Every structure is written in C-alpha cells, then in structure tokens.
Amino acid sequence: MTDLGQDIADLDAAMRNLVQTMKRPQSWAALSARADLTIDRPGATMLRLLVAEPGNWRLHDLAERLGVEAPSITRKAQQLELAGLVYRERDTKDGRAFSLRITEKGRIVARKIATAQRQILEAALQDWPSADRQQFINLFQRFSADLSQQYKPTLNK
C-alpha cells in the first residue's frame, strides 16, 4: 500500500500544474484563437454558464455562482450587452433588479468556446486507450464531486 501523504503531495502537484496551465494568458489566447474569437475569459465564463444553466440569472446570483464581486459582474454584463451577447430585463419578482439573458449571438459564441475546449481535450486524450480515458473520466468525476463536498460550508450546531 502506498503512503497517502505522498499520494496527496503528487495529486497536489498535478492539480497545481493543471490550474496554472488553465489560468495562463497563453492558454486562453490559444483557446480563443482556436475558436476565432476575441472575447475575454470572464465574459466567456459568463456565457458558458448562461448556456449550461439557463434560467433567471439576477446579476447578484450570477456573481455568487461564479465567486466574484457583484460590481465585476455588472461591468462584464454591460460589456457583453454592448457586444450583443446578452441582454438585461427587469426581474419579474423585483422591479429594481435585472435578470441576464443570453442572445442568439451569445449562444453562438458560447458554442464556439465549447467546441474549442473540446478540441483541446480531444488532442490531449487522443493517444490514450479508450479504457484509460473512461477510467480517468469516471475517477475525475468522482474526485470532483467529492472535492466539491469538502468546500461546502458546514453548519455549526
């Protein structure tokens, strides 16, 4: 049996490498070039969420979901709106608030981003045997779900 401490150290190093790779400006530049787009990462993240989780997204809720401050979401929503990728409409429950909706143009941009991301994943996994890919996906989904549970706030009783 292997030492859990060493396994955790190896996993931590691999996760740091993955996160650093994904956060590099060069990585985003490569992805946006592949998608033939000039949108920035925060704008793309908002569009992908609006497509992946459609619904009534108030700006405050969107900021909370993405883990950023509300003023950042407001500014980014204004930029996306000027670009014709989203539109704001008055919230039906609270006339002071606005909900963000994605436009057809925004959906097209989100699809291009998703396609480029899938192409990059495909290139990374293309030489893996099918069984390895499936095992990796299953374990990664399990790990992601378990890790997500560790970051949920606990209620003190």
Image (cartoon, rainbow, N blue to C red):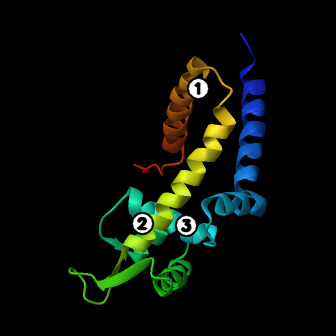
* Residue corresponding to mark 3: 44
Along the viewing direction, whichever of 96 and 150 lies nearer the viewer: 96
**Quarter holding the N terminus?**
top right
**What label does residue 107 carry, if any?**
2
Q: Crowdedness of circle 1 by 10 Å Cα count: few (<14), some, many (20+)?
A: some
On the question of residue 67 being in view, the answer is no
The residue depicted at 33 percent of the width and 62 percent of the height is 54
> In front of the other: label 2 or label 1?
2
Q: Crowdedness of circle 2 by 10 Å Cα count: few (<14), some, many (20+)?
A: some
* Residue corresponding to mark 1: 133
Are discs 2 and 3 less than 8 Å apart at CB? Answer: no
Farthest residue to the left: give it.
Answer: 92
| Secondary structure under the numbered disc 1 in the rendered image | helix
The residue type indicated by label 1 comes to Arg
Q: Quadrant of residue 140?
A: top right
The residue type indicated by label 3 comes to Ala
Q: Crowdedness of circle 3 by 10 Å Cα count: few (<14), some, many (20+)?
A: many
Along the viewing direction, whichever of 126 and 23 lies nearer the viewer: 126
Along the viewing direction, whichever of 101 and 73 lies nearer the viewer: 101
Q: Residue 56: give x, y in percent of width and height.
A: 30, 70
The residue type indicated by label 2 comes to Arg
